[in-house]
Image (spheres, helix red, strand yellow):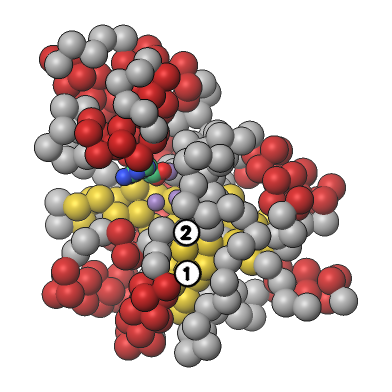
Amino acid sequence: MSLMIDLHSHSNISDGMLSPVELIEHAAMHRVDVLALTDHDDTSGLKIAAIEAERWGLQLINGVEISVTWKKRTLHIVGLKINPDFPPLKAGLEKIRAGRHIRAEGMAAGLDKIGITGSLKGAYEYAKEGIISRTHFARFLVSTGYAKDNKSVFKNYLVKGKPGYFEHEWASLEDAVSWIVGSGGVAVIAHPGRYDLGRTNMLLLLEEFRALGGTAIEVVTGSHTVDQYVEFAKYAHQFGLKASQGSDYHGKGLSYMEMGRLPALPSNCEPVWQGWAEIDVAESNAE
Ligand code: AMP
Ligand code: MN
Ligand code: MN
Ligand code: MN
């Protein structure tokens, strides 16, 4: 029996629907054996998730998904097997979270201008003690009837060129990779098929990422098509990068993929988890 490995997921510490404890239970119920919790710019769910994972016999990987600006575009870099207490990582994430508050005010001001008031307070009510993100604005806008669902609210209000979009500078690629790697973790480019970079910039990104100490790219992820699995397996091979897989689960109505449904990596990929003690241990337990 092969293990169900899911190296990308969100709790309500960032923009997921489930608490870290509920997320672990959900993963276990969907037969996930190894789960990385990778909240956006925040690692505060990892401790409680680890305790819950232990109860379910699920192997938890400490993760994070860092927001990065590269060539004026937003990219997401996943860190796996990170040490959340590594001071530069902690400080870096704190700074990103502070930036999120300022950005949220800018987003709300943009929405105010078109007559949508109260979005700042409304979004924060969904964010609770976690980070503030576009997903929380989306939930406010859907609940107040400005859009019918999450997908259309992004398209009409929250992407570049729309009133609720606010240009923001995230961490640099270099910093994000160095915080992750410096903490003992492995850096992975999240959902490379979502950036719309064009071939030239994709090649530049992969080259630069590898030179900075990046290890892998997500080949199988909830937002990739089957063709993109093949495409990014090729890129990984070409650049000597390993391959990762993850659902990017956010909760019902917010995710591309339910947990426990990930197809296997294409056979020409070298899995990012090859040789990880965490997974070998889980494997021997499973037998
Ligand atoms: P933020 O980091 O605040 O910009 O929020 C980004 C999050 O919004 C992503 O991690 C997704 O969960 C969600 N998201 C981004 N684009 C879309 C989209 N087009 N449709 C639905 N959700 C999206
Ligand atoms: Mn998200
Ligand atoms: Mn992402
Ligand atoms: Mn994600």
- Amino acid identity at mark 2: Gly
Residue 54 can be seen in this image: yes
Between the C-alphas of marks 1 and 2, the distance is 7 Å
Query: Which residue is at a point 42% across and 73% down the rendered structure image?
Result: 226
Quadrant in the picture for the N terminus: bottom right
Q: Quadrant of residue 213?
A: bottom left
When asked about the image quadrant of residue 23, the answer is: top right
Point 86% across, 71% down: residue: 285
Q: Judging from the image, what secondary structure is the residue with disc 1 in?
A: strand
Q: Quadrant of ligand 2?
A: top left
Q: Nearer the viewer, residue 252 or 24?
A: 252
User: Which quarter shows the C terminus?
Assistant: bottom right
Q: Is residue 222 left or right of residue 107?
A: right
| Residue 162 place in picture, x, y as percent | 16, 33
The tag on residue 28 is none
Callout 1 crowding tier (Cα within 10 Å): few <14, some 14–19, many ≥20: many
Q: Which of 49 and 29 lies nearest the eye of the viewer?
A: 29
- Residue 86 in percent (x, y) is at 52, 50
Residue 87 visible? The answer is: no
Mark linked to residue 222: 2
Give the residue type at disc 1.
Answer: Val
Q: Residues within 10 Å of mark 2 (few under 14, many from 20)?
A: many
Above or below, 7 against 129 in this view is below
Name the residue at 74% across, 59% down. Answer: 31
Q: Position of residue 232 (x, y in %)?
A: 36, 76
What residue sits right under mark 1 in the picture?
220
Q: Residue at x 52, y 88 (%)?
A: 267
**Where residue 26 sits in the image (x, y, percent)?**
70, 46
Q: Nearer the viewer, residue 159 or 168?
A: 159
- SS for dot 2: loop
